[in-house]
Amino acid sequence: MQSNSKELVLDRQTIQNRVLEMGEEISRDYQDQELLVIGVLKGAFIFMADLIRAISIPLATDFIQVSSYGGGASSSGKISLVNNPNSPVKDSHILLVEDIIDTGLTMQWLVNHFIDQGAASVRVCSLIDKAERREHQTNIDYLGFAIPKGFLIGYGLDYDEKFRNLPEIFHLILETD
Ligand code: IMP
Ligand code: MG
């Protein structure tokens, strides 16, 4: 039988403070540009909601959905496009918002996808960098937290579509007995 326990990694205040700082930095950097913020579904939806409210300049929002993880905690190693944004991408300044970068496969694919479509610029904002399993080189322009390892849940991050609603971020500990 499998029973799960969790250990707190980032509390609400810590997340909120960092998100506010990131919003300020993004607002400064894009002062003179038209910004299109594209969230990577589903994991980024909670972070993105807080982040855009911390950005003080005008911006447009959209979402993209790709799938790489089958359902559990391990990657399938392949990316497929599930939903493309409706917004015009050509000549836009795009900020990709992601919950977590693990192997880097998803983000590398996404950056290339938007460059191929003629974006004027593509930058990456990720709440978490889990560098231990990095296989595909990815530049993170705006990073919330570096958390080297473990499987994380909460604040949008799921395990099998569950736990996204937790306001804090936890390490999920899978125990088999
Ligand atoms: P990558 O392609 O290996 O970088 O994986 C990126 C995607 O895998 C993220 O957008 C998440 O959806 C998912 N993922 C990776 N690590 C975790 C984790 O610790 N918790 C929840 N989802 C994860
Ligand atoms: Mg994700």
Image (tube, helix red, strand yellow):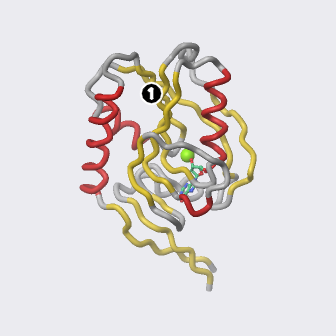
Q: Residue 154: percent from the left, percent from the top?
A: 43, 57
- In the image as oriented, which residue stretches furthest toward the bottom? 177
On the picture, is 122 further left or further right than 114?
A: left
> Residue at 63% across / 47% down in the picture?
137
**Vertical relation: 77 (above or below) 62:** below
Q: Residue 2: percent from the left, percent from the top?
A: 60, 77
**Vertical relation: 151 (above or below) 61:** below
Q: Residue 117: percent from the left, percent from the top?
A: 65, 19
Crowd tier of the residue under label 1, counting other residues whose Cα lies within 10 Å: few below 14, some 14–19, many 20 or above: many
User: Which residue is more in the foreground, 18 or 137?
Assistant: 137
Place residue 73 in its image quadrant.
bottom right
**Vertical relation: 67 (above or below) 9:** above
Q: Residue 173: percent from the left, percent from the top?
A: 52, 74
User: Which residue is more in the foreground, 85 or 147?
Assistant: 147
User: Which residue is more in the foreground, 146 or 56?
Assistant: 146
On the picture, is 133 further left or further right than 33?
A: right
Place residue 133 in its image quadrant.
bottom right
**How many numbered discs sit on the rendered protein?**
1
User: Which residue is more in the foreground, 175 or 124?
Assistant: 124
Check disc 1 and report the residue beneath it: 37
* Image quarter of the N terminus: bottom right
> Residue at 49% across / 54% down in the picture?
129
**Vertical relation: 3 (above or below) 91:** below
Task: Give the amino acid type for the residue marked by disc 1 in the picture.
Answer: Val
> Residue at 40% across / 16% down in the picture?
34
* Image quarter of the C terminus: bottom right
Label 1: which secondary element: strand
